[in-house]
Amino acid sequence: MALNLAPIVQQNQRFLFSFSSKASTNSQFCFDLKKSLFPLSFSSSPSLSSSSASHSHVTCVSTSPVEYAPPAPEFDFHQEVARLKRLRSKLSDSTSLREKHAVVDGDARVKRFFDSIKKGGFSRVLLASLNLDSYELFLVKCLVAAGQEHVLGFGFEFEPLESELESARSSLKSAFYALVEMTEKLDVDGGGGNGSGRLGKKSGFGLEDEEIREFKKLLKTLGEIEQFYNCIGGIIGYQIMVLELLARATCERQTTNWSNKLMDCQFLEIQVPSGLDLSQNTEYASQAAIWGIEGLSDLGEIYPLGGSADRLGLVDPDTGECLPAAMLPYCGRTLLEGLIRDLQAREFLHFKIYGKQCITPVAIMTSSAKNNHKRITSLCERLGWFGRGQSSFQLFEQPLVPAVSAEDGQWVVAKPFAPICKPSGHGVIWKLAYDKGIFKWFYDHGRKGATVRQVSNVVAATDLTLLALAGIGLHRGKKLGFASCERQVGATEGIDVLIEKKNLDGTWAYGLSCIEYTEFDKFGITNGRPSPKNLQAKFPANTNILYVDLASAELVGSSKNENSLPGMVLNTKKPIVYVDHFGKRHSVSGGRLECTMQNIADNFFNTSSSRCYNRVEDKLDTFIVYNERRRVTSSAKRKRIHADKSLQQTPDGSLLDILRNAHDLLSNCDIRLPEIKGNDEYVDSGPPFLLLLHPALGPLWEVTRQKFHGGSISEGSELQIEVAEFLWRNVQLDGSLIIVAENVMGSMKINENDEPILQYGQRCGRCKLQNVKVLNKGIDWNSGNNIYWKLDVQRFEAFKVILHGNAEFEATDVILQGNHVYEVPNGYKLKITPGRSGLSVQLHPIEQKMMDSGSWYWNYKIKGVHINLELVEL
């Protein structure tokens, strides 16, 4: 399709691209979309809130043709892409492995590579140690055909002593002569994997054991790329996509990176999407949350945990090994434990309302980066699969992909056979889920939809955000939903947008989509201070909190084309840093091919025969909900550098947002708390207090608020409540108060598979505090060893209660002063009341008939669109 960018009158203040086909009679400037790109000029309208019910539009206008032409690059991207596309086409037409070998053997680059080796004049070498079969040899040939023969070590630039250099070259050359022998003698009909075509004798000129291991790892990586990216042509298709994206990036001031199906239209318009504001339309938000609670038995949970999280700089304190983000110790537990804890709080709420046990199946996408898959599996095993049973989890591993040079798409290598590999981006989750049978597994558990949440976002389950999102998605039969909020300028996060386009056939198409922050420059969207010209301020944040209809997602993941890998991008803005096998540190400009899971939305556009002007979102298969930012997203993504005054996206900053949420929650319960100022106020001093509440106290705030009323929490105090059945009435806290239940939401029972399963509501710990004053010295806020976000703090004194099993604790009309720890045994109630000479402390056994229910409990009832609690005392 030819592209005409005609001048557009600035009327409705829209972010507008105007396109027309070659046949258009009013064309002024024509460009080949694949080869020519143009700059865009921008003007903007006054900013509107991202949660506004009406659209905010931003104008995009071009009034002149492009005069600038970049110099021809040394590497001819288009020529190389054309060569690889011809090769891919021939390979796709091949019906057998023998035919594929014949095709790739005919590639000029493959011929040249192996011919150059044979000219060395060495005698015949059998490399038994490699033990390649026909398919593995095909993978090696594809690597060479893709222009990556340097990965095999031939021509690799070493910098050791001369003797080391010659030794390395000798063993590597021996390997290549063996490969030549295979190309001439190996019966490629032997098949991949049956061993009939393998070399079986050991040669004295083989590789060292370490080199063999690296070569086998390389074969595994190549096999994963060839298999997973089969929808675009395997290894060859992967390299084509890399080169095409790099070719676009070499053209300065390029336009959008939308897929062809978005660009194949007469014009395209980007608007700020409207949707339900949960913080404003509270009645409908409550109704949506109840739909979410009711539909919990139809929902699954999906966690993309395969990222490497390099910015966290997380290491194992014992071994020094790098750790993935899921293992970050946050507020006393790993981030993964925090996700499951939030999920169980929603399940507990479902139980309290409907009296039914609900265990949500959880699918976790891992990777081999930083031993991610192994570590997450070990954590789940060590914690007994969180009392949910192993059958309620599915862990599936995403492939690693090679990092490439921004200059020419060459794979970056640390040593022979060892390309630098990184996770392939969370967008591979849909195809991978289909390939690994995850959708079928969800269906077998009776699930229709799923919520998606990233591990670094520690506030995503705050109040009703997740429940309302899922409730609307289920109740209204939507295919995809986004939870969004105001975007924080400068944050490494994308934006959600509403797309309107007129197709070449005259129909109109509408749908929600996302623009990654790495693509902002291509739209003229730049980071900076909020201003009328700052386009970022117009659009809401992409938080990667999603609701997805499983059948719709499976349809995309199962497609045999590029659609199954949504939002493919190549971010070359961050250098690739690595250390080679000689200990030398390198930093090169490059990136890796990534997919973005939220751009599955590009497959869910709705069409109309005429243009829609009002409330188009109501008619879409996709939707968006808004809430206050700190109730939607606050991430622990990067390690705070000591000299850095910014706490944005650090564990320190996200803890402050948790405390702000707790302040908002309790201040509406007639509890006085210190105000929390801006992050800059606490860069060096730490937070004004610590206040951590178990999510099962709600997780809906309207539920939690019925358990708290009256009193105060003074500055410098600490409150930890790890109990769901809890009552606070007129409590004044000055110091540290810690209540911890062994059984927060229920107790463990052994199922038929000898697995411990958490039974909600059975033998929970309980605590009542009425007219109580707690006074102690609390936390040593001057200690330099305090790490507040880890909950690793030094205390002078604390009042702490530990409830074992179904133990209960009650304190009424007393002052609890000084340093005390009370451990209440299973089956007992500890009561503290005023006595003649101080406090009366009484420990009594719980009556047998109350062992399961306790001596009191909260009864949950739905009234209209709200949940009312009633205190029942037995």
Image (cartoon, rainbow, N blue to C red):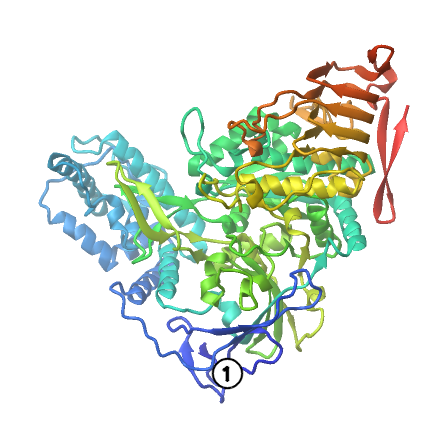
Residue 24 image point, x, y percent: 49, 86
Taking 521 as reference, is 708 above or below it? Answer: above
Residue 293 image point, x, y percent: 76, 44
Going by the picture, which residue comes out furthest to the bottom? 25
Q: Residue at left 62%, top 74%?
A: 508
Looking at numbered disc 1 in the image, what kind of residue is underneath it? Pro
Taking 759 as reference, is 827 above or below it? Answer: above
Q: Nearer the viewer, residue 314 or 832?
A: 832
Q: Residue at left 74%, top 13%?
A: 825
**Which residue is the site of mark 1?**
7
Q: Residues within 10 Å of mark 1 (few under 14, many from 20)?
A: some
* Left or right: where 727 falls relative to 777: right
* Left or right: where 281 falls relative to 263: right
* Quadrant of image for the N terminus: bottom left
* Quadrant of image for the C terminus: top right
Residue 739 position by quadrant? top right
* Left or right: where 338 falls relative to 172: right
Q: Nearer the viewer, residue 533 or 257?
A: 533
* Left or right: where 155 falls relative to 12: left
Give SS at disc 1.
Answer: loop
Report if residue 726 is visible in the image.
yes
Report if residue 745 is visible in the image.
no
Going by the picture, which residue comes out furthest to the left? 121
Taking 799 as reference, is 645 above or below it? Answer: below
Q: Residue at left 51%, top 73%?
A: 42
Residue 444 image point, x, y percent: 66, 41
Residue 520 image point, x, y percent: 48, 62
